Amino acid sequence: MKLFFIVNPAAKNGYSLRIWKKIEKRIINEAIEYEVYFTKHAGDGSRQVRNILQNTKEKVLIIAVGGDGTIHEIINGVYPNKNAIISYIPAGSGNDFARGYRTPRNPKQALEHNLRLLAKNKTITEFYKVDCGLFQVEDSTQGCFINNLGVGFDAAVAKVVNESKVKRLFNKFGLGKLIYILILIKELFNYQTSRIKLHIDGEEKIFENVWLVTISNQPYFGGGLKITPDAVVNDGRLDVIIVNNISRWKILFLFITVLWGGHKKIKGVNFAKGRKINIESEKQIPIHADGEYKGVDKVSVHVAEKAIAILNDLKTYE
């Protein structure tokens, strides 16, 4: 089976490109047939994957080399095609996909992981099907997410982080997570909460003074924050967290406890599970999917059950 690599050379200030050069040497030594595509602009990864899948009817293995934004684009190029199996070599700042889907976070170990499974099973039947989320922002953007979708404060932070010129400098010195924390604190004093109407599988609930609503298919976001500790990648449901009626200072404490899942005991932190979720706010608030800004408006989300195949040892998920 032929391998296709989608490489984001800009991820983590060029770190991804350096990782790719090491990967390429290894796969050439292994005499593995492959093609590589480099992204230059937003949306390139999705377009490249769609082109690959349009030109073959056989099963293909598509490996992302980059960050969570790269895997997000690949997922949006793959869905709903059934011939693609995806894998990941983490080379970005956050790499929450690696955490949530239990793949090695070290690039070298991730490569060895892929090569071991390829050697073990040349026909690539050693894969695992996981859920993904489908979203529609009213009258505009639609697509998939594999990690999580957020509405409110976390989306505002993600937008500022991605647009920050300082992020490149921090990444250069391996301090990418620090810029997220600094911007989180800055936005904490600017962000205004709102009233949210939430429908989960047809049941309506209204929440006042909402900071954020995050819908997840796996536990992690924001570079290792365990936002939805009970999320399972293949249970046919999405996990929802709603944070409301909490003071600004308490939000800081909440994000500290999220590191180990301690926020579950904090008053004002609400959890739910569902297959179909609609979010409507009294005012326009930002939305992100896998850390990528998607606009401001009402958003509807539903789960696509076992829609994505991931190359992994099945024992990993037992």
Image (cartoon, rainbow, N blue to C red):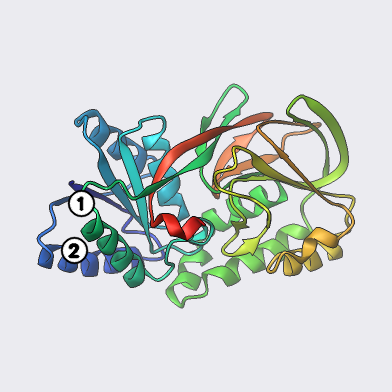
Asked if residue 49 is positioned above or below residue 102 in the image, the reply reads above
Q: Are marks 1 and 2 in contact (CB under 8 Å)?
A: no
Q: Residue at x 35, y 32 (%)?
A: 82
Image spot of residue 207 (x, y percent)? 87, 39
Foreground pick, 164 / 149: 149
Image spot of residue 215 (x, y percent)? 66, 43
| Direction from residue 315 to residue 183 in the image, left or right | right
Image spot of residue 127 (x, y percent)? 37, 48
Q: Quadrant of residue 185?
A: bottom right
| Direction from residue 31 to residue 152 in the image, left or right | right
Q: Quadrant of residue 229?
A: bottom right
Q: Residue at x 57, y 58 (%)?
A: 161
Foreground pick, 295 / 126: 126
Q: Secondary structure at mark 1?
A: loop
Q: Residue at x 30, y 34 (%)?
A: 83
Which label sits in the foreground, 1 or 2? Answer: 1
Judged from this view, the residue extending furthest toward the bottom is 173
What residue does disc 2 label? 24
What residue does disc 1 label? 122
Q: Amino acid at mark 2?
A: Glu
Q: Earlier in the sequence, mark 1 or mark 2?
A: 2
Asked if residue 71 is positioned above or below residue 264 in the image, the reply reads above
Foreground pick, 163 / 57: 57
Foreground pick, 194 / 226: 226
Q: Secondary structure at mark 2?
A: helix
